[in-house]
Image: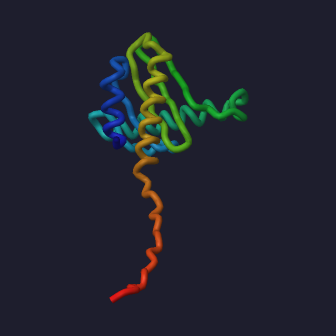
């Protein structure tokens, strides 16, 4: 599953997610459901900045931040991150918070699993001994 497919699956299984972006932890877009690239890039950059700002707060500076939710009366923004990626999504008002976080974490796990499986496995070379022809 490539990144674009991971996001397509995410938006298909989670009816609450309106748009989403998958990025590296610095905010560089890997895949996006936004119709305009610029909007996806801006959203990914803002999501990465939101995580940095939350992590830099005094209460969280010594802890590993893995998820953030920002809510307004019109909708919510969710961000979930791992060591290499973040996935950020926009929902409507009053989403099922736990379910959205679960779906976003599942998206990252599936992407990580796919990337791990794509890595080339080391080639094991076995030495074949020649057996001398003892007869004819």
Instruction: Tell me the quarter of the image containing the C terminus.
Output: bottom left
- Return the x and y of residue 129 as percentages of the image width and height: 46, 77
Residue drawn at (61%, 30%) of the image: 54
Q: Is residue 62 left or right of residue 95?
A: right
Residue drawn at (54%, 32%) of the image: 50
- Return the x and y of residue 72 as percentages of the image width and height: 47, 15
Q: Residue furthest bottom?
A: 136
Residue drawn at (52%, 22%) of the image: 69
Q: Residue furthest left?
A: 35
Residue drawn at (48%, 25%) of the image: 78
Q: Please, is residue 136 above or below residue 100 in the view?
A: below
Instruction: Tell me the quarter of the image containing the N terminus.
Output: top left
**Structure colour scheme:** rainbow
Q: Nearer the viewer, residue 106 or 15?
A: 106
Q: Please, is residue 75 above or below residue 1 in the view?
A: above
Q: Please, is residue 105 above or below residue 72 in the view?
A: below
What is the count of numbered marks?
Answer: 0
Q: Nearer the viewer, residue 14 or 91?
A: 14
Hey, which quadrant is residue 55 in on the image? top right
- Return the x and y of residue 122 as percentages of the image width and height: 47, 61
Hey, which quadrant is residue 121 in on the image? bottom left
Q: Nearer the viewer, residue 134 or 67?
A: 134
Q: Please, is residue 71 above or below residue 88 in the view?
A: above
């Amino acid at each position: 599953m490539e990144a674009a497919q991971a996001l397509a699956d995410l938006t298909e299984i989670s009816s609450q997610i309106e748009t989403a972006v998958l990025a590296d932890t610095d905010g560089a877009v890997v895949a996006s459901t936004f119709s305009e690239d610029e909007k996806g890039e801006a959203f990914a950059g803002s999501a990465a900045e939101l995580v940095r700002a939350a992590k830099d707060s005094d209460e969280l500076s010594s802890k590993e931040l893995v998820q953030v939710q920002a809510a307004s009366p019109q909708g919510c923004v969710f961000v979930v991150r791992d060591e290499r990626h973040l996935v950020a999504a926009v929902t409507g008002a009053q989403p099922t918070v736990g379910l959205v976080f679960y779906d976003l974490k599942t998206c990252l796990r599936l992407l990580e699993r796919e990337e791990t499986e794509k890595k080339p496995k080391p080639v094991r070379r076995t030495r074949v001994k020649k057996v001398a022809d003892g007869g004819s």
